[in-house]
Image: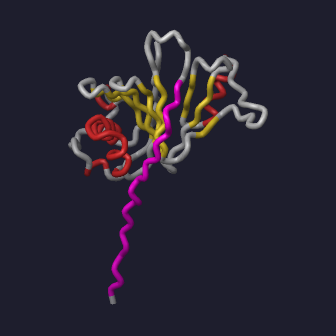
């Protein structure tokens, strides 16, 4: 296994069934991924029908339009992780409404992530984690806001390297704010 994405989420919309369960897979586009959060405007995204949950609509939009178009236009809370079969990269992005934390094993051969930093304690109890450097002895790292991080995941690659590609800043549109007219 090169990458394993698991997701446990409290229901926020839609029925509890297999169709609405993560991860959402779009094999024709080569995208499979998960979303933590609740979107306010998913009904305005291409592919929306009343029978679909926000995360599924988000993943289809991502598979069809890519990350910049998608995350420039979604409103609400999101931390999203997806694997792109075409680029062989696992991708991470979050906004200010959802956290996303990372840690690496001491030998840097495995990376773990979670929504909440305390969830990584289970990993720490079982594996030796990378302690950081003398200058920066941080073990757990929070993903920067609105920044797409991509790591190469190459099945059968014996180099054991995790390659971080240049982070890409994504500017989400400001949330819509309704201002009530002053009526006299």
Return the x and y of residue 155 as percentages of the image width and height: 43, 13
* Residue sitting at x 62%, y 25%: 104
Give coordinates of residue 86: x percent, y percent.
33, 25
- Whether residue 178 appears in magenta in the rendering, the answer is yes
Question: Residue 140 lies in what quarter of the image?
Answer: top right
Q: In front: 62, or 124?
A: 62
Q: Residue 165: within the magenta?
A: yes
Determine the residue positioned at 69% across, 24% down.
130
What is the chief secondary structure element of the magenta stretch? loop
> Colour scheme used in the picture?
secondary structure
110 shown above or below 142: above
6 sits left or right of 136 in the view: left
Task: Report the magenta residues as a range.
Answer: 163-183
Height in image: 88 above or below 79?
above
Quadrant of the snapshot with the C terminus? bottom left
In x, y percent, where is residue 173?
Answer: 38, 57
Nearer to the camera, 35 or 180: 35
Residue 45 versus residue 2: which sits nearer the camera? 2
Q: Is residue 139 above or below residue 179?
A: above
Who's the residue at 52% across and 47% down the image?
145
Q: Position of residue 142 (x, y in %)?
A: 60, 40
Given residues 107 and 177, the one toward you in this image is: 107
């Amino acid at each position: 296994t090169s990458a394993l994405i698991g997701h446990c989420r409290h229901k926020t919309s839609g029925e509890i069934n297999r169709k609405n369960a993560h991860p959402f897979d779009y094999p024709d586009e080569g995208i499979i991924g998960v979303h933590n959060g609740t979107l306010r405007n998913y009904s305005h995204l291409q592919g929306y029908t009343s029978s679909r949950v926000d995360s599924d609509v988000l993943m289809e939009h991502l598979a069809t339009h890519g990350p910049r178009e998608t995350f420039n236009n979604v409103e609400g809370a999101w931390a999203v992780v997806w694997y792109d079969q075409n680029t062989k990269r696992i991708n991470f992005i979050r906004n200010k409404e959802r956290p996303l934390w990372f840690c690496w094993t001491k030998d840097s051969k495995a990376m773990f992530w979670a929504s909440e930093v305390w969830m990584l304690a289970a990993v720490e109890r079982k594996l030796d984690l990378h302690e950081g450097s003398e200058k920066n002895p941080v073990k757990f790292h929070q993903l920067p806001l609105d920044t797409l991080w991509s790591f190469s995941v190459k099945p059968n690659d014996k180099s054991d390297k995790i390659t971080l590609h240049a982070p890409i800043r994504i500017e989400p549109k400001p949330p819509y704010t309704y201002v009530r007219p002053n009526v006299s």
